[in-house]
Each structure stands twice: as structure tokens, then as C-alpha cells.
Image (cartoon, coloured by chain):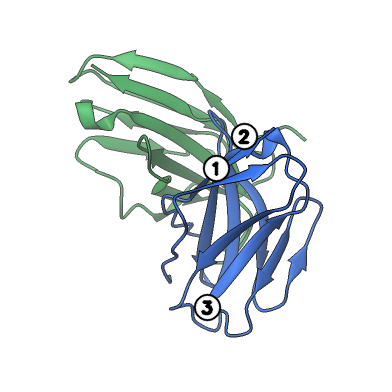
Chain colours: A green, B blue
């Protein structure tokens, strides 16, 4: 079974530029998550999708971050404009759960390491 | 969701059992204890979870105290590949949200 795919693996940009990350979840997984992991810290949930609807985006800085999952499969996370403090690893995860607010195992991708100069 | 407390780091000799403690004194009756680990440059990996009873799978064992205020993850025969950050997470019955702390850095040494 293929795992969660993410691209690119690494990205370096200047502050105020924009950047986009792509995630392809495990086939058949209804729920998709984006996490931000700053160096030395645990991952922090940014946004959770159930199929193509948003379940939780309470921690997403909506003035600069946006995410979409148009067809309920793959997803993109965008930052525009980027700040120095956005330097982090952006992790995508998916789970099978078909009903929002139920417990299921999350499977993580390898992440995209973003450096903002 | 209840908070957890874990040691910052631990060392373990290769081939020996690694016992990773976690305190979750404010856990409520319907909250589960989950363990994930994160090997360098990889995403977190699910290990095991439990509610009240001890659990075992091919990766590890989870021992939960009777009062459920603490738990221990046991890797029975640690290898160098088990060097990672281990996260103990308390998770509600209804809610897929994982709230990660800083975790425990486990270093397995030969």
C-alpha cells in the first residue's frame, strides 16, 4: 500500500514570496490533515479536511495560509506572503475515518522542509 | 484533551528493553493514550494505543496504570533504528485531533 506522498521535499524562498505544497493521501482515506512542525517542537495541526470539507482550521493563520482539497483526494497548502517564522516542516497526514469527529489512526507523509530567508 | 508529561531524553543500550514513561494525571474516562514516534527526517509513525488494558503489538507494549494517570511504552529489544522522538498523546473518544508535545528523544546506543 502506497503511503502519503508529499512534494516538494525541500523548498527555500525569500520572505514575502509565495509557496505551495502538495499532498496525495493514502487511497480511500477520507480525512486529510496538514501539520506545521517547527524545529525542536512537536507537530501542530493547521487544518483538517473530511472529504473536501473543512472540519477544523482553528489554528490556520488565515491571513497568509490557505488550503484546499477540491475533489476530496489530494490537497494543496499555500503560504502567501511567507514570513521568516514560517520556516518549518509541513506534514500531511491522512486517515480512513469516514465520519467526522471519530478516532482513527493517522498516517503521515515525509513532510516538506521550508526555509524562508 | 488532557496534557502529558514526558522526560526530555533517554538512553538505552541496543538489545535491551526501552521503557518510556508518560504522565497524564488529568486523563478522563473516555480518553485514549496514543504513542507515535518520529525518526529523523520522517513523519510521525503510529505505534500503539490503549484505553484501560495493557496492549501489545508487533512494535511495542503499552502498560497503563490502574488509575490511568500514567503509562509506559516498552520496546522489548531496542535496536539502533528505534532512535527517535517518542510522543505520548491523550486523545478524546470523539475527535481525531492529535496534540503533540515535545516528546522524549530516545537514543539507542551500541
Please say if B110 is above or below B18. above
Q: Residue at x 35, y 52 (%)?
A: A57
Task: Check disc 1 and report its element: helix, strand or loop.
Answer: strand
Confirm whether residue A100 shows in the render: no
Q: Residue at x 30, y 46 (%)?
A: A60
Residue nearest the observer in this picture, A81 or B61: B61
Side (left or right) of B50 relative to B43: right
Q: Are the residues at dot 2 and dot 1 in contact (C-beta closer than 8 Å)?
A: yes
Q: Chain of mark 3?
A: B
Residue nearest the observer in this picture, B75 or B43: B75
Q: Which residue is mark 1?
A: A93
Q: Position of residue A112 (x, y in %)?
A: 46, 26
Extreme residue toward the right, this view = B58
Please say if B62 is above or below A70. below
Badge number at residue B69 = 3
**How far apart are the alpha carbons under marks 2 and 1?**
7 Å
Q: Quadrant of the N terminus of chain B?
A: bottom left
**How far apart are the alpha carbons under marks 2 and 3?**
34 Å
Q: Chain of mark 2?
A: A
Side (left or right) of B69 relative to B15: left
Side (left or right) of B99 relative to A29: left
Confirm whether residue B76 shows in the render: yes
Q: Residues within 10 Å of mark 1 (few under 14, many from 20)?
A: many
Q: Which residue is mark 2?
A: A4
Q: Residues within 10 Å of mark 2 (few under 14, many from 20)?
A: many
Query: Can you tell which quarter of the image residue A80 is in?
Result: top left
Q: Residues within 10 Å of mark 3 (few under 14, many from 20)?
A: some
**How far apart are the alpha carbons under marks 1 and 3?**
29 Å
Amino acid at each position: 500500500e502506497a503511503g502519503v506522498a508529499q512534494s516538494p521535499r525541500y523548498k527555500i524562498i525569500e520572505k514575502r514570496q509565495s509557496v505551495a505544497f502538495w499532498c496525495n493521501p493514502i487511497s480511500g482515506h477520507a480525512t486529510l490533515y496538514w501539520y506545521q512542525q517547527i524545529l525542536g517542537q512537536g507537530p501542530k495541526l493547521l487544518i483538517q479536511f473530511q472529504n473536501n470539507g473543512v472540519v477544523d482550521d482553528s489554528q490556520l493563520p488565515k491571513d497568509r495560509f490557505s488550503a484546499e482539497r477540491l475533489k476530496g483526494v489530494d490537497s494543496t497548502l499555500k503560504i502567501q506572503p511567507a514570513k521568516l517564522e514560517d520556516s518549518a516542516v509541513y506534514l500531511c497526514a491522512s486517515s480512513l475515518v469516514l465520519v467526522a469527529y471519530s478516532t482513527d489512526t493517522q498516517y503521515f507523509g515525509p513532510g516538506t522542509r521550508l526555509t524562508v530567508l | 484533551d488532557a496534557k502529558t508529561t514526558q522526560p526530555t531524553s533517554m538512553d538505552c543500550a541496543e538489545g535491551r528493553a526501552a521503557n518510556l514513561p508518560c504522565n497524564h494525571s488529568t486523563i478522563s474516562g473516555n480518553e485514549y493514550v496514543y504513542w507515535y514516534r518520529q525518526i529523523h527526517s520522517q513523519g510521525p509513525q503510529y505505534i500503539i494505543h490503549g484505553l484501560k488494558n495493557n496492549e501489545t503489538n508487533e512494535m511495542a507494549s503499552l502498560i497503563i496504570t490502574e488509575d490511568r494517570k500514567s503509562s509506559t511504552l516498552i520496546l522489548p529489544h531496542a535496536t539502533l533504528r528505534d532512535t527517535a522522538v517518542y510522543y505520548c498523546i491523550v486523545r478524546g473518544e470523539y475527535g481525531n485531533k492529535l496534540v503533540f508535545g515535545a516528546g522524549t528523544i530516545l537514543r539507542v546506543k551500541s
